[in-house]
Image: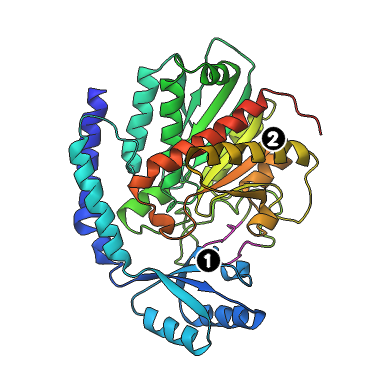
Amino acid sequence: MAVLLALCAAVCCSALQTVGAKLYSNRYEGDQVLRIIPSSHVEIQLLKQLFQNITVDFWQPSSTSFIHMGSSVDVHVGRNSTGRLKAHLQQSHIHYKVLIPNLQKEMEKQAGNRSSRKRRSEFQYDYEVYHPLEEIQSWMFEMNRTHPHLVDMFSIGWSYEGRPLYVLKLGNRKRLHKKAMWIDCGVHAREWIGPAFCQWFVREAVNSYLRDSSMRRLMNQLNIYIMPVFNVDGYHYSWKTDRFWRKTRSKNAKYHCRGVDANRNWKVKWCDEGASLHPCDDTYCGPFPESEPEVKAVARFLRKHRKHVKAYISIHAYAQMLLYPYSYKYATIPNFDCVETAAQNAVSALYSAYGVRYRYGPASTTLYVSSGSSIDWAYKNGIPYAFAFELRDTGYYGFLLPEALIGPTCMETMRAVRAIASGLLKKCTS
């Protein structure tokens, strides 16, 4: 552990220089996050036209395709465009409010809190701060080293930029041929709460194995595969260059724009509704299904273990939702009753922690229609329970969820995931 802490201190110092002192070269000074709520179809059309002329970074939903009447549209607007956008909105009588008045200042405030917290906890790995990729990978090695009876670490492939794609396998090694559950985090780079949860889950699972009989039962009867950072290249880039980067970092031969939406690249209704063919869009589906080595590696691993994997969980943010198939169409899955019950139990368990309410249901009706998603692929490939969590919050902080909320968010989500895992040990007939 001493080796890990020394390495963390060095890496952390470097990361804080990037995120704290330089803070992305002050690139977000004067930028704002606006929440716009169109109240008619006319206003929706006006908004779509407006966003063709004014470039914004969509936070929620992920593109103009998903703008609906009465639903919030959260956009990150550059300092040179805020005045023009507000003027157009006011002129068209479209309701909006400012969620974050100065993105740079909000980030500096959070970075300052991170710096002081790191100084207080230099001798202990802190699960209530966000960690850069190098620290997370060092932590994975350390968990593997210190808990050999419960943790096995391996790589399932390499990212576009040549980074290893590490996975932790949790479970009592003495029992063979067990059911399995897969959890991935960090599919979209800017959703930092995802990797924070995956680390929290591992810590709780191994630390409570001896004292918590229900966790011990789960670990004895299930293998749990955890991928803390799915999109390693994008996550690294979100720490070093662009905090709000979403996609992978693959290059395109015809466009300067980089990356593919790793949750639109799966081989299930690929590049249909809710995905974009344009490489510069945040929902770009890629040149072909599984074009991204990260997606291909996970798909290959899950196909190989499909006989044992009974649940697939992908952790995203933000919206406070628990989603299940289908994403690409308005239809009811064959085992709807079992999946709906599992979702209801998970959301109830989550609510029991702090009273935070999550909506749950099919992704297409609860959030929006999207094709090429991981949960649809998992379900189509024989994994009966496929879920996507959209963690806190509902937009006040958005992708800048403060580190003070990591603990509560992870604690409540832990209850939900444990509820889903416990359900796998029971037989459900629908």
Q: CA distance from mark 1 to mark 2?
A: 30 Å
Image point (33%, 76%), residue name = 79
Is 234 one of the magenta-colored residues?
no
Give the image location of residue 10, x and y in percent. 20, 38
- Predominant secondary structure, magenta span: loop
Query: Dividing the image into 4 quarters, which one contains the C terminus?
Result: top right
Q: Quadrant of residue 120?
A: top left
Numbered-mark total: 2
Give residue 383's mark: 2
The question of residue 279 being in magenta is answered with: yes
Above or below residue 316? Residue 221 is above
Chain part drawn in magenta? 274-287
Foreground of the two, 159 or 25: 25
Q: Which mark is residue 281?
A: 1
Task: Please report the residue visible at 46 percent of the width from the left and 80 percent of the height from the top.
Answer: 54
Q: Are marks 1 and 2 in contact (CB under 8 Å)?
A: no
| Closer to us: 307 or 345 | 345
Instruction: Indicate the position of residue 55 as horizontal and vertical percent values.
Output: 45, 75
